[in-house]
Structure formats: structure tokens, C-alpha cells
Image: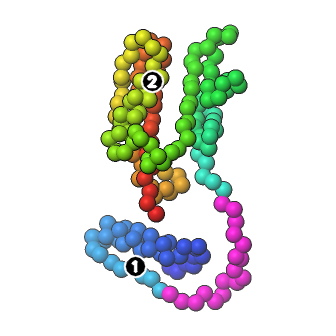
Amino acid sequence: QKFTVFAEDRDKLVASLKSAWKTDHMFRCNKVGQFPESEGRVADVGPIVTKKKEIPPIVMAPQPHYARINQKDYSFFLPTSFRVDPSREGFYLQKAKGDVFEAELQFQILDSFQVEDSQVLKEKEDIKFFCRSYALNLVPSRERYWILLDQLYFKRMNLLGDKASWHGWETHIRTNSHDIIVIFLRRKYIP
């Protein structure tokens, strides 16, 4: 069956189709086959519209009873029971009954910086120590704490197709009154 496709990056599309077809063919037929490709002039398609459309960004919908929160060009989801604290940036409050707060969340999104500009981060291992020391600095003084997580963090949901390499570290510290979670990501990309 023949079909005609118009694409901005035709070569990449054809290469992907060839690879997918060959993989499927090997799986179903248990032998290697060649993608039936032919080139020709498209004659009876009609006028081709060259107007470029604005492609809307990919946006995930929140789960039921959750709301999208946007902060510094980042989006995350919180239960709808949380409200923005207008007096403090990055704070979200969840009321229990009356005026008593059941939970308080604070999101700090630091500005990105170049590794060359940093005196702290030089190697991949330094991500771990930077993340842990940042989390420990957030612990209230003279309060007991437990380190629950101190592990690699794997960035998920690459919705924009970023080709960069991401290294991350996650530290979770619990005190008697707080849970402190710090996730530090390092993006490496050489064009």
C-alpha cells in the first residue's frame, strides 16, 4: 500500500520508518528484509500549502484532584487542597480544619549556572556532595535528622526530545518537623 507524506525533515522520517519496518519484519518473519522504498514525483496531490503552523507545546494534563503549578518556567502538579501563599514565593499551604495548616511545601528552583563558573562542581561525583551539603544547610540548627535517601536521580519524561545527557542526585532528609528533599540536575550537551 502506497502513501504520501509531507514532512519538514523527510530524511529523518524515512530513516525512522525504515528502521521500524525492518525491526517489525525481523520480529514477525524471523528474517532480514529490505524496506520497499521508491522515489518519484508527486503529480496529483493538488496545491501544497507552505504556511507553517504554530505547534502548541506538549503539556501534560494533571491527574484528577491535582492542579498544575508553574514556577520559573517549570511545571509540577500538587493536590488541589494546596493553595499558593501570596506572602512568600514558592510556598504552598494545605489547610486541615479551620486556620490550622496540615502541610507546608516550599519549592526552590535555583538559576542554572555554568560548571566552569563554579568552584564546587568539577567532576560527576561532586554532584552528590553538592546536593547533600545543600540539603544539610536547610536542616534547622540543633535538630536531629535522618538521611532517608542519598542516591542517583533519573530524569524522566523527556517530552521535548532533549539530546543532552542529564546526571542527577537526590537527597531526602527527615527531621522531627520537616522533610527536606533536594534534587540536583546537571545537563551536559556539546552541539
- Where residue 189 is drawn, which disc sits there? none
Query: Relative to the observer, which residue lies in front, 57 or 125?
Result: 125
Q: Distance between the residues labelled 1 and 2?
A: 59 Å
Residue 46 falls within the magenta-colored stretch: yes
Q: Name the residue under label 2.
A: 137
Crowd tier of the residue under label 1, counting other residues whose Cα lies within 10 Å: few below 14, some 14–19, many 20 or above: some
Residue drawn at (60%, 76%) of the image:
6
Q: In which quarter of the image is residue 111?
A: top right
Crowd tier of the residue under label 2, counting other residues whose Cα lies within 10 Å: few below 14, some 14–19, many 20 or above: few
Which secondary structure class fits the magenta region best? Answer: loop
Q: Where does the magenta region start and end? A: 39-55
Residue 47, x across and y down, in percent: 72, 82
Q: Mark 1 points at which residue?
A: 35
Residue 188, visible in the rendered structure:
yes
Residue drawn at (63%, 10%) of the image:
100
Query: Relative to the observer, which residue lies in front, 124 or 21?
Result: 124
Residue 20, x across and y down, in percent: 41, 68
Residue drawn at (58%, 35%) of the image:
77
Q: In this view, does 186 lie to the left or right of 105?
A: left
Residue type, mark 2 in image: Asn
